Image (cartoon, rainbow, N blue to C red):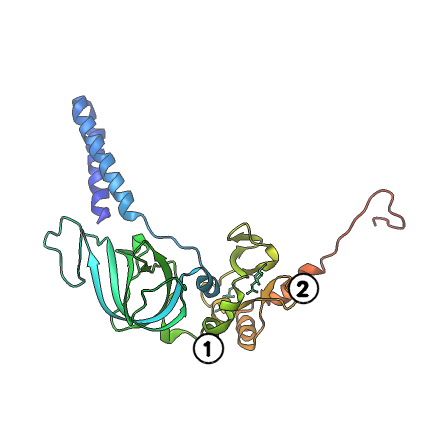
């Protein structure tokens, strides 16, 4: 779509350059403002949703709710009111992109829910942005998902987005289910942060000893599949909890063990020297 517009803009620009001298000033001004208008609309269309990679444990901890639900029906809103998703709006020029979607879902399990929320029914609506550009999630009918999200507004809408945890429920593995049932909930004092070397993406006010570092492997991420960031028994911080599958996964990826890395860092030598240190000579 915007490719057409780019082409159009290029043609106008060429026109301007080739025939510019013969244009009257107001004509050029008109074209320029048209150009700017088109550029603005392109920028709006191309604007995309960006989410930082987030570990399931962090998804669980930052969410207002975490549920398992099956999609029963989808409705979309192009303007004021919702219509069935397979109905094409009467005036296609009015709004080609839906503003919002809602999914009627049947909720099977609630792994997390705020005590203050009173709207739980067997059937609830989940709201999301109308398109991928507004971080909207496209769920499929009759499919069961694990979903995390936020509760927003005075009418307590359950909102999901592409930046939350959205996964077909049947693809969750043993450790992710174990995390949902137990480990994630009991370790929200810990924080899994996406790191590149020592630069981590996360809130600054977290005590670094409560941070488990995570460098996602985009092809096969052992941390997402098998990792729990748990509190140390002495309460001094958090670390990646060892388990056999986690270890095997790291071995098959040829990745370092996070528990070994920590130890290496702890025993890093500290050398203090000054002119008066006795018995020490540089070679
Ligand atoms: C989390 O940390 C706070 C203080 O640092 C402590 O009071 C609280 O008990 C901890 N929560 C859990 C679940 O351990
Ligand atoms: C990521 O996983 C693949 C195998 O699934 C492995 O070959 C690769 O070395 C890993 N990448 C890193 C950076 O560890």
Image quadrant of residue 136? bottom left
Q: Position of residue 268 (x, y in %)?
A: 71, 57
The residue at which mark 2 appears reads as 263
For marks 1 and 2 on the same chain, the one whose residue lies earlier in the sequence: 1
Using the rendered image of the protein, determine whether residue 155 is visible from the camera's viewpoint. Answer: yes
What residue is rendered at 26% in x and 39% in y?
39
- Determine whether 158 is above or below 95 in the image: below
Q: Quadrant of residue 177?
A: bottom left
Q: Residues within 10 Å of mark 1 (few under 14, many from 20)?
A: few
Relative horizontal placement of residue 202, taking residue 158 as reference (left or right): right
Which type of secondary structure does the marked residue at label 2 adopt? helix
Task: Answer whether residue 23 is visible to the viewer in this image.
Answer: no
- Figure quadrant, ligand 1: bottom right
- The residue pinned by badge 1 equals 174
Where residue 209 sits in the image (x, y, percent)? 61, 58
Vertical placement of 253 versus 133: above or below? below
**Coordinates of residue 255 in the picture (x, y in percent):** 56, 67
In the image, is the residue at mark 1 within 8 Å of ligand 2 by its beta carbon? no
**Placement of 65 over or under 245, stated as above or below:** above
Q: Residue at x 33, y 51 (%)?
A: 48
Which residue is pictured at 10% across the width and 54% down the height? 90
Residue 124 in percent (x, y) is at 28, 67
Mark 1–mark 2 contact, CB under 8 Å? no
In screen coordinates, is 77 left or right of 54?
left
Residue behind label 2 places its C-beta within 8 angstroms of ligand 2? no
| Disc 2 packing (10 Å; few <14; some 14–19; many ≥20) | few
Left or right relative to 26: residue 62? right
Disc 1/disc 2 C-alpha distance (Å): 28 Å
């Amino acid at each position: 779509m915007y490719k057409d517009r780019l082409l159009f803009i290029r043609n106008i620009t060429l026109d301007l350059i080739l025939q510019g001298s013969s244009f009257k000033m107001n004509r050029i001004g008109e074209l320029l403002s048209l150009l700017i208008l088109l550029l603005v609309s392109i920028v709006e269309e191309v604007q995309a949703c960006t989410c930082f990679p987030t570990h399931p444990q962090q998804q669980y901890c930052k969410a207002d709710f975490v549920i398992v639900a099956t999609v029963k029906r989808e409705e979309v809103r192009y303007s004021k009111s919702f219509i069935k998703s397979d109905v094409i709006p009467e005036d296609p020029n009015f709004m080609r992109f839906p503003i919002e979607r809602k999914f009627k879902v049947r909720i099977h399990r609630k792994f997390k829910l705020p005590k203050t929320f009173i709207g739980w029914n067997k059937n609830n609506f989940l709201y999301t942005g109308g398109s991928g550009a507004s971080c909207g999630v496209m769920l499929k009918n009759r499919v069961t998902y694990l979903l995390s999200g936020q509760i927003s507004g005075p009418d307590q809408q359950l909102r999901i987005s592409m930046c939350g945890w959205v996964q077909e429920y049947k693809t969750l593995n043993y450790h992710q289910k174990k995390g949902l049932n137990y480990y994630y909930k009991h370790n929200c004092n810990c924080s899994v942060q996406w790191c590149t070397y020592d630069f981590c993406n996360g809130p600054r006010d977290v005590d670094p000893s409560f941070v488990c570092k995570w460098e996602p492997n985009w092809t096969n991420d052992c941390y997402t599949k098998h990792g729990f960031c748990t509190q140390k028994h002495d309460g001094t911080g958090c670390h990646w909890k060892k388990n056999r599958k986690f270890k095997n996964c790291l071995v098959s990826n040829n990745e370092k063990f996070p528990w070994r890395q920590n130890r290496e860092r702890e025993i890093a030598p500290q050398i203090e020297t000054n002119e008066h240190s006795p018995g020490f000579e540089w070679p």
